[in-house]
Image (cartoon, rainbow, N blue to C red):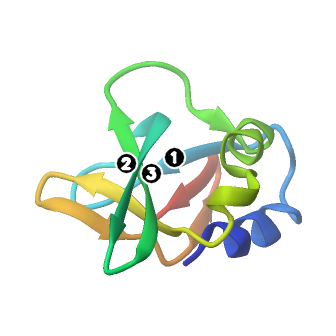
Amino acid sequence: MRTIELLALLADQGINTNVYLQTDGPRAVFRTFRTLTENESLQLIFVPQTGGHPLKVWELRVLINRPELRGAYLLGDGETGPQAIFGFQEQDDGLVLH
């Protein structure tokens, strides 16, 4: 999934909905990302953290809605390395990117 696609999907979600990340372990909160260029493709890699509050949809949109990031592929940093994010699942307490 690319950043622009996630932004389009988030447009239909409540702005105060929590957003979590789940890669190869339990779901986690994230507040930052790093970028990497591989095979001439920009990758935006969400970095999970322990503790803290989850991002809200509006905060995630502000974080990633930059012209230079819109074509970037989304990944989540997992225990075995970065893993592609293909979408999200709606749960009772928020959205889980996976």
Task: Kindly identify the residue that appears in the image at 58 percent across and 68 percent down.
Answer: 89
Between the residue at mark 1 and the residue at mark 2, the CA separation in whole angstroms equals: 6 Å
**Disc 1 to disc 2: CB gap under 8 Å:** yes
Q: Nearer the viewer, residue 65 or 90?
A: 65
The quarter of the image holding the C terminus is: bottom left
Task: Kindly identify the residue that appears in the image at 55 percent across and 68 percent down.
Answer: 72
Foreground mark, 3 or 2, reads 3
**Disc 1 to disc 3: CB gap under 8 Å:** yes
Task: Kindly identify the residue that appears in the image at 53 percent across and 57 percent down.
Answer: 96
Q: For the residue marked with disc 1, what is the amino acid?
A: Tyr
Residue 75, how many percent across, how many down? 40, 63
Q: Which residue is mark 3?
A: 21
Q: Which residue is mark 1?
A: 20
Looking at the rendered structure, the secondary structure element under dot 3 is strand
Corner quadrant of residue 36? bottom left
Task: Kindly identify the residue that appears in the image at 81 percent across and 71 percent down.
Answer: 8
Residue 27's disc is 2
